[in-house]
């Protein structure tokens, strides 16, 4: 079926269920940012392949809401589908809630699969329906009825993260979590977020592409825990390790009856942003529900010293691979060889795969040539796969999962001589990235306090970029890890203060539709600095050590301080990476880290 046929089929199911408006989010049953193939219902019904977005279908309209990272992509992918793009956050654009309030008829029904909708969103939809004297219907997976060739749930094996990598045992983590449970007067803790469970149990899996997670739920009690997952995925030695910590494995879908069977006088701790609406509705009446952010969220965001030591090792490996790729790219473009976006991406992956301890890519790679770079989350396919040529730039946003941690790096590289405008934009991005990386700040600042340090150079030119400047990164987990970020606009939940041993990206960019896109990204470690009569100061230490392309830079457009920042960074790049290169690569790196 094409997209209009799928929409027609969905509307027939809506009519059978007397549903006026049906909502299809991007989430799985665990509120994950990225989901496995089985859960890509929103992609199935719209054809839009981006990771973020929500579809809303009425009897005669269909809309897709997504953010600024995907506006260009969504516009192209929705063309001819009959689905209207709603550009979230743009002036004059309805939110989903405003659309529902306007379009839901009196006495109408809002439908959704409650397993894929979070508690907060579900409550909002219920309130809107109530205001219209209507109701919600959250028990029907209408997409599942019409998706006849839906993929199966994954069955890959689980693997264990030894303490030499994790730095802390499951028993120790459970003690910390149970201390928080007692602090919040809860004797049960419901965990649904996959990265929190994986971190807590020191297990990893392959249930979501690029995210080494295991589909599971966890109920933590005062003296034991029940893990709801596919038992066949767990090797016997991992089952034994879990049993040693008094953790039993029970069938994945039994979580709903288990929650429904909790004692009504229990106190249950849960995170409304990370638990689905159906699970929430199954909690018995009378149960004391403590709605707070999962304590695991902040615990895993603050890395321990073992993790930090490992992460630094992973980044040196990644820097060697990426520097070798830049050297290869600069040389291959001068030959008659045909290199495309995809083959260039494959070459970078091959350099990474040569590194000891490399497991897989940490997210779907972005390899975007020329005007494709203006599509923030561009993904090359056989149809769009551009041939690289001199005179334009290649943007690569890639990363790797290693036993020692996860990496995320963006570099934009000039292929031959590029235009003055492209050099000006590259220099702007480089200045922004360097200024934020070298910031010193007082303890207590969040990413919202510091984001303007990167954006200032853009705003002075009266330009901006329509995405966050940085995000937290997990340790062999999600490459986008909450709760920290760099954003000039706070979200619904303000980001916490930046603490020692947090890891965050620094990735400003500029995007000129139809011409070029430039983004430069380093990962940073939050470090304690001087403590004096003015307070506790903090600074960042770069984790990424890959040169910025001097062929694309205009040093005369940088301040003296910015040039000093760049030269200092490039000295460190050479010192850390050159010992692992051959003679030709080392000579090239010396040239590309020269003082400016």
Image (cartoon, helix red, strand yellow):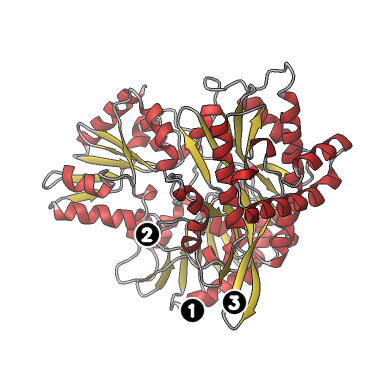
Q: Which circle's residue, 3 or 2, is located before the other in the chain?
A: 2
Q: Mark 3 points at which residue?
A: 536
Q: Which circle's residue, 1 or 2, is located before the other in the chain?
A: 1
The answer, for residue 364, to whether it is visible in the render is no
Q: Is residue 319 left or right of residue 196?
A: right
The answer, for residue 510, to whether it is visible in the render is yes
Residue ID at (38%, 57%): 279
Q: Distance between the residues labelled 3 and 1?
A: 31 Å
Please rate how many residues cluster around mark 1, counting C-alpha atoms within 10 Å: few if below 14, some from 14 to 19, many from 20.
few
Please rate how many residues cluster around mark 3, counting C-alpha atoms within 10 Å: few if below 14, some from 14 to 19, many from 20.
some
Where in the figure is residue 178, as x and y percent of width and height? 54, 74
Residue ID at (49%, 34%): 374
Q: Is mark 2 on a helix, strand or loop?
A: loop
Where in the figure is residue 147, as x and y percent of width and height? 39, 30
Q: Where does the N terminus fall, quadrant-wise?
A: top left
Q: Mark 2 points at which residue?
A: 492
Q: Distance between the residues labelled 1 and 2?
A: 27 Å
Q: Mark 1 points at which residue?
A: 182
Where in the figure is residue 46, as x and y percent of width and height? 36, 31
Tag in front: 1 or 2: 2
Contact (Cβ within 8 Å) of mark 3 with mark 1: no
Residue ID at (33%, 58%): 120
Q: How far apart are marks 3 and 2 (CA)?
A: 28 Å
């Amino acid at each position: 079926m094409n997209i209009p046929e799928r929409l027609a089929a969905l509307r027939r199911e809506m009519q059978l269920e007397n549903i006026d408006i049906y909502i299809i989010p991007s989430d799985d049953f665990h509120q994950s940012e990225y989901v496995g193939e089985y859960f890509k219902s929103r992609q199935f019904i719209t054809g839009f392949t981006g990771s973020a977005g929500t579809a809303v279908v009425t009897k005669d309209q269909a809309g897709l809401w997504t953010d600024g990272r995907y506006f260009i992509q969504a516009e192209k992918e929705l063309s001819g589908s009959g689905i209207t793009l709603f550009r979230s956050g743009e002036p004059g654009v309805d939110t989903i809630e405003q659309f529902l309030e306007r379009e839901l008829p009196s006495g109408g029904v809002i439908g959704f699969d409650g397993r894929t909708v979070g508690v907060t969103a579900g409550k909002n939809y219920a309130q809107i329906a109530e205001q219209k004297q209507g109701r919600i219907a959250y028990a029907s997976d209408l997409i599942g009825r019409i998706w006849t060739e839906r993929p199966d749930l994954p069955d890959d094996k689980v693997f264990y993260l030894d303490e030499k990598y994790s730095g802390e045992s499951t028993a120790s983590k459970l003690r910390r979590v149970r201390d928080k449970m007692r602090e919040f007067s809860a004797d049960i803790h419901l965990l649904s977020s996959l990265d929190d469970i994986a971190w807590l149990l020191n297990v990893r899996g392959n249930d979501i592409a690029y995210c080494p997670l295991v589909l599971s739920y966890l109920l933590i009690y005062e003296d034991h825990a029940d893990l709801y997952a596919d038992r066949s995925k767990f090797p016997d030695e991992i089952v034994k390790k879990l049993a040693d910590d008094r953790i039993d494995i029970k069938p994945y879908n039994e979580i709903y009856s288990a929650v429904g069977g909790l004692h009504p006088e229990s106190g249950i701790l849960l995170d409304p942003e990370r638990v689905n609406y159906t699970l929430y509705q199954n909690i018995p009446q009378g149960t004391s529900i403590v709605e707070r952010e999962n304590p695991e969220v902040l615990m895993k965001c603050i890395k321990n010293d073992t993790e930090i030591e490992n992460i630094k090792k992973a980044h040196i490996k990644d820097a060697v691979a990426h520097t070798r790729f830049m050297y290869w790219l600069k040389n291959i473009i001068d030959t008659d060889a045909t290199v495309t976006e995809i083959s260039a991406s494959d070459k970078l992956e091959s350099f990474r795969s040569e590194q000891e301890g490399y497991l897989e890519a940490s997210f779907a790679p972005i390899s975007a040539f020329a005007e494709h770079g203006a599509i923030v989350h561009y993904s090359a396919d056989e149809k769009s796969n551009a041939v690289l040529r001199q005179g334009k730039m290649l943007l690569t946003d890639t990363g790797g999962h290693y036993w020692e941690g996860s990496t995320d790096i963006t570099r934009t590289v000039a292929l031959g001589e590029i235009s003055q405008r492209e050099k000006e934009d590259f220099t702007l991005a480089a200045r922004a990235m360097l200024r934020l990386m070298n910031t010193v700040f007082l303890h207590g600042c969040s990413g919202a306090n510091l984001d303007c340090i990167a954006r200032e150079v853009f705003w002075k030119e009266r330009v901006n970029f329509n995405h966050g400047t940085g995000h937290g990164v997990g340790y062999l987990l999600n490459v986008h890890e909450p709760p920290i970020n760099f954003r000039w606009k706070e979200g619904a939940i303000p980001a916490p203060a930046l603490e020692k041993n947090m890891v965050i990206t620094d990735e400003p960019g500029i995007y000129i539709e139809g011409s070029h896109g430039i983004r430069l990204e380093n990962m940073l470690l939050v470090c304690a600095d001087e403590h004096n009569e003015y307070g506790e100061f903090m600074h960042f230490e770069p984790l990424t050590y890959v040169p910025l392309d001097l062929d694309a830079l205009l040093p005369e457009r940088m301040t003296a301080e910015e040039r000093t920042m760049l030269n200092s960074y490039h000295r460190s790049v050479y010192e850390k990476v050159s010992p692992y290169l051959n003679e030709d690569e080392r000579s090239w790196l010396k040239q590309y880290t020269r003082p400016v």
